[in-house]
Amino acid sequence: MPTVDISAGLLPPPACYASEQDRLDAYAAALIGNLNTGDEWAVQETPPVNTGLYWLRTDTNGRPVEVLKFSTADSSWIRMQSEVVFGGVSTGAANAYAIANNPVYPTALSAYRTGQIYTFLANHANTGASTLNVDGQGAKAITKDVATPLIANDILAGQVVSVLYDGTRFQLLSQKRDMTRQSLKQFLTYASSPVPILQDGTLIPFNHGLGVMPFMVRAVLIRDTGSPGTFDTFTDSLPSPAVQFLWYEGQEIDCMHFVADRTLDLPAFKYLCDPAQVNIQVVAFNSILGGIGFPYMTPPLGPSSNATNYKVKVYATALNPAYTPP
């Protein structure tokens, strides 16, 4: 460490001072201070031997790269501040990325400091959830949109990847405009699970969770039995079906696509919706009775069908308030 040595200089004879203040000023002016110090800095590519130094690391061309100080706690050279560290081309495979720094981070505590940013060139494209291991200090998950695991091709071979350690994981900073991301979807669509048809006219609630009023609601019937069913169109002049359709298990059909005349009960849907919920009522339309809608469910496809073979499902689409144009 540097030291300061102070020595006395020569003072003129006392008779020369008009006052004691002049004498004090002359004494202070005559003091000699000497700064004694050795080297404090090493400017080179490899770590210096003297561990008491600050080290300005340079590249092979002598250009400064970063500042380090020897840490006795870690027994190694430690970067003095959080900064963007370039780890070169990564190694590893099968979604397990690894980078090696010069000098290496000697402990996990020094390698994984909250706020530390690492940048590297990916040596392979990812195919799913991925991790990054810095200087062999342990693999940490790479995520996007806070804690969402990566999907295939979020990282491409040769891509410049930047990640920030948040104290738990590496959050991906160099995200692509992935239209599967919620923030980039202009429209949000909720698809409910199929539920049994209520035949007493009760409203069936579907909590869509979109947070905004849907601008389009679509209700469908789903055949919920193993064997295919049939439904027909009739005419007044033909005693037998004019056209017959097959309806397979799991097939979704919107009732507006049914073709029928006044001999067939045709289900229809009424709905009410708000920013949290869509309420559906299934009603039968029987033109024999003068086209009156009934608030109860007769068999969906005419008197011979079984309502328990069918379920109702809802789709609700709304504008995404968090939409970010690509």
Image: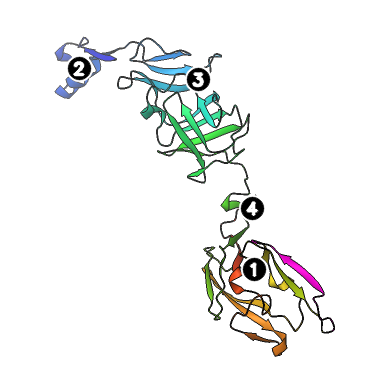
Closer to the eye: label 2 or 3: 3
Using the numbered discs, state the Cα–Cα distance from disc 3 to disc 1 in whole angstroms: 67 Å
Q: Amino acid at mark 3?
A: Pro
Q: x, y (%) of residue 38?
A: 33, 10
- Specify the segment rendered in magenta: 237-250
Closer to the eye: label 3 or 1: 1
Using the numbered discs, state the Cα–Cα distance from disc 2 to disc 3 in whole angstroms: 45 Å
Q: Is residue 326 above or below residue 163?
A: below
Q: Can you see residue 258?
A: no
Q: Residue furthest bottom?
A: 290
- Mark 4 and mark 3 lie on one chain; the one further toward the N terminus is 3
Q: Which mark is residue 325?
A: 4
**Residue holding disc 3:** 64
- Mark 3 and mark 1 lie on one chain; the one further toward the N terminus is 3
Instruction: Describe the element under mark 3 as helix, strand or loop.
Output: strand
Closer to the eye: label 4 or 1: 1
Q: Amino acid at mark 2?
A: Tyr
Residue drawn at (57%, 52%), measured in percent from left and top? 183
Viewer-proximal residue among 240 and 289: 240
- Mark 2 and mark 1 lie on one chain; the one further toward the N terminus is 2
Closer to the eye: label 4 or 2: 4
Q: Residues within 10 Å of mark 4 (few under 14, many from 20)?
A: few
Q: Residues within 10 Å of mark 3 (few under 14, many from 20)?
A: some
**Residue holding disc 2:** 27
Q: Along the horizontal axis of the image, is 66 left or right of 253?
A: left
Q: Are marks 2 and 1 in contact (CB under 8 Å)?
A: no
**Residue holding disc 1:** 220
